């Protein structure tokens, strides 16, 4: 019986440790939503961007919907303005330390070029 209790304690400890380690790692979506970002394109134009669950607010310019694919390797911005000529911009998203680089994947995204997101201080 003591042996079984010992194994149960070890199993419970392992499960708790696994849960804590998993919970500590933030997803890209959580990271984007928890900070304000300096958004800079390849031409050097920049602004502050703030993400919430489904929208990205681009300074005073307005907002666009966005979503990350399930593996968080592609971010897609969707302009819901019915007059928009470039409604969908798709980028690969790569993290390097605390910054993100967005590389265009479609024609509409190439208009923005490569984007760098750096957390605002």
Image (cartoon, grey):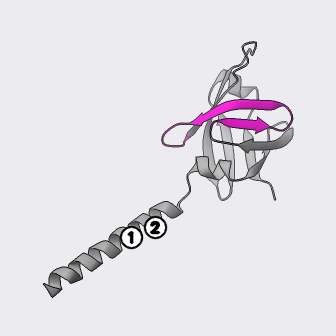
On screen, 103 above or below 89?
below
Query: In the rendered image, which quarter contains the N terminus?
Result: bottom left
- Residue visible at 46% across and 61% down? 22
On screen, 10 above or below 110?
below
Which residue bears the numbered disc 1?
16
Q: Residues within 10 Å of mark 2 (few under 14, many from 20)?
A: few
Q: CA distance from mark 1 to mark 2?
A: 6 Å
User: Left or right: 72 with respect to 34?
Assistant: left
User: Left or right: 17 with respect to 121?
Assistant: left
Tell whether position 67 is magenta. yes
Question: Do the residues under discs 1 and 2 have CB atoms within 8 angstroms?
Answer: yes
Label 1 sits on a secondary structure element that is helix
Point out residue 37 in the picture as x, y percentages from the top left corner.
76, 48
Label 2 sits on a secondary structure element that is helix
Q: Which of the two residues, 2 or 109, is positioned nearer the viewer here?
A: 2
Span of residues in magenta: 54-73
Q: Residue furthest bottom?
A: 2
- Residue visible at 72% across and 13% down? 82
Q: Which of the two residues, 108 or 83, is positioned nearer the viewer here?
A: 83
């Amino acid at each position: 019986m003591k042996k079984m209790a010992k194994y149960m304690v070890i199993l419970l400890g392992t499960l708790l440790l696994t849960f804590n380690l998993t919970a500590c790692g933030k997803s890209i979506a959580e990271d984007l939503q928890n900070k304000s970002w300096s958004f800079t394109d390849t031409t050097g134009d920049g602004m502050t961007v703030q993400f919430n669950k489904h929208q990205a607010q681009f300074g005073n310019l307005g907002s666009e919907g966005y979503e990350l694919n399930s593996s968080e390797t592609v971010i897609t911005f969707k302009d819901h303005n019915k007059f928009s000529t470039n409604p969908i911009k798709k980028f690969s998203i790569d993290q390097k330390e605390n910054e993100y680089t967005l590389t265009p994947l479609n024609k509409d995204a190439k208009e923005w070029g490569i984007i760098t997101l750096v957390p605002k201080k």
